Image: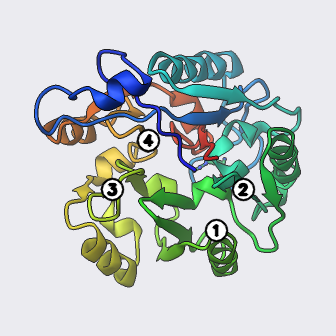
């Protein structure tokens, strides 16, 4: 079940905010979330499994940790509940917690990575889920968790083309008993669904659900599907997507995004969201941003 506690702009929380009018008509409402993150203590770029990664270029682990900390502090400041998993030496990409699994209704669908460099992260995250009260479903098919599975209303959007496979879409559909909409990614820069699409209102009914995306990251059929389903979607520019601007986290009102995605920031503000920019330049060297560093826990 999704958590129902809410916080509003004034920082009121729980029943008070839920029952009180939310200010101006049409003002958006945030919902308190529970996240899992992994401090990038072992972050570096030592292999190349996406076009963003250049192992020969230097990385600054201390800076990565400071930038990550600012993201953590932002979530805590918004009233969200943030859990931590211990980073493991030798797994430099473990900071991208979104890939650790996909959780819904207290069930954690484990990840099975496409590349062997990240394979050991799957069991590490599954262990954490089991120790924290989730029923863990061992994956049979290759899938990279919330990187490619995103909940919008009652529908699960699922990416394929680079990492997660069609088999995993069927596996998730059977496991969660929800409609899974398969979307095919075609641009190697946007190799996970969460680099090409952002969920802005995840907890509302499908009718009001909204997303933001970069159309040319998807094949023709997927573009048609998205246009039909989400006629009010925010269409983001390539410039903003190319700084992983879409790789963002919304609580229904506050949208934490890359501070470099200035156009997306303006589009969100126009629609009544509260964009909050965070600089994760160091983690961008591994091909990840705000959303990659964040796994949502849904009980
Ligand atoms: N270096 C990582 C990889 O290529 C980055 C993962 C980014 N995560 C995400 N959810 N998009 O696997």
Q: Which residue is mark 1?
A: 176
Residue contact at pointers 2 and 1, CB within 8 angstroms: yes
Number of the label disc, if any, that sits on residue 248: 4
Of the image marks 3 and 2, the number of the one nearer the N terminus: 2
* Closer to viewer: mark 3 or mark 4: 3
Q: Residue furthest left?
A: 25
Of the image marks 4 and 2, the number of the one nearer the N terminus: 2
Classify mark 3: helix, strand or loop.
Answer: strand
Number of the label disc, if any, that sits on residue 69: none
Alpha-carbon distance for marks 3 and 4? 11 Å
Of the image marks 1 and 3, the number of the one nearer the N terminus: 1
- For image coordinates 52% across by 35% down, the residue present is 33
Residue contact at pointers 3 and 2, CB within 8 angstroms: no
Q: Which residue is mark 2?
A: 107
Residue 235 figure quarter: bottom left
Of the image marks 2 and 1, the number of the one nearer the N terminus: 2
């Amino acid at each position: 079940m999704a958590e129902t506690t809410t916080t509003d702009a004034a920082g009121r929380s729980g029943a008070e905010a839920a029952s009180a009018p939310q200010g101006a008509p049409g003002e958006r409402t945030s919902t308190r979330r529970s996240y899992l993150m992994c401090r990038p203590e072992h972050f570096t770029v030592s292999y190349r499994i996406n076009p963003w990664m250049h192992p020969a270029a230097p990385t600054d682990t201390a800076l990565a940790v400071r930038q990550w900390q600012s993201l953590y502090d932002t979530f805590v400041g918004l009233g969200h509940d943030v859990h931590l998993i211990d980073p493991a030496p030798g797994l430099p990409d473990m900071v991208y917690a979104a890939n650790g699994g996909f959780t819904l209704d207290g069930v954690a669908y484990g990840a099975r990575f496409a590349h062997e460099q990240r394979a050991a992260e799957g069991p590490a995250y599954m262990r954490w889920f089991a120790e924290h009260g989730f029923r863990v479903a061992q994956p049979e098919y290759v899938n990279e968790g919330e990187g490619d599975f995103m909940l919008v209303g009652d529908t699960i959007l699922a990416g394929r083309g680079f990492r997660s496979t069609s088999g995993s879409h069927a596996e998730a559909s059977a496991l969660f008993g929800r409609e899974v909409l398969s979307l095919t990614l075609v641009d190697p820069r946007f190799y996970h669904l969460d680099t090409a699409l952002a969920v802005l209102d995840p907890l509302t009914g499908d009718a009001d659900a909204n997303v933001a995306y970069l159309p040319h990251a998807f094949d023709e059929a997927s573009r048609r599907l998205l246009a039909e389903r989400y006629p009010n979607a925010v269409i983001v520019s390539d410039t903003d997507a190319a700084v992983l601007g879409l790789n963002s986290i919304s609580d229904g009102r506050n949208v934490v995004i890359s501070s470099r995605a200035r156009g997306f920031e303006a589009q969100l503000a126009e629609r009544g969201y509260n964009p909050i920019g965070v600089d994760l330049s160091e983690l961008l060297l591994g091909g990840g941003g705000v959303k990659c560093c964040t796994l949502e826990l849904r009980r």
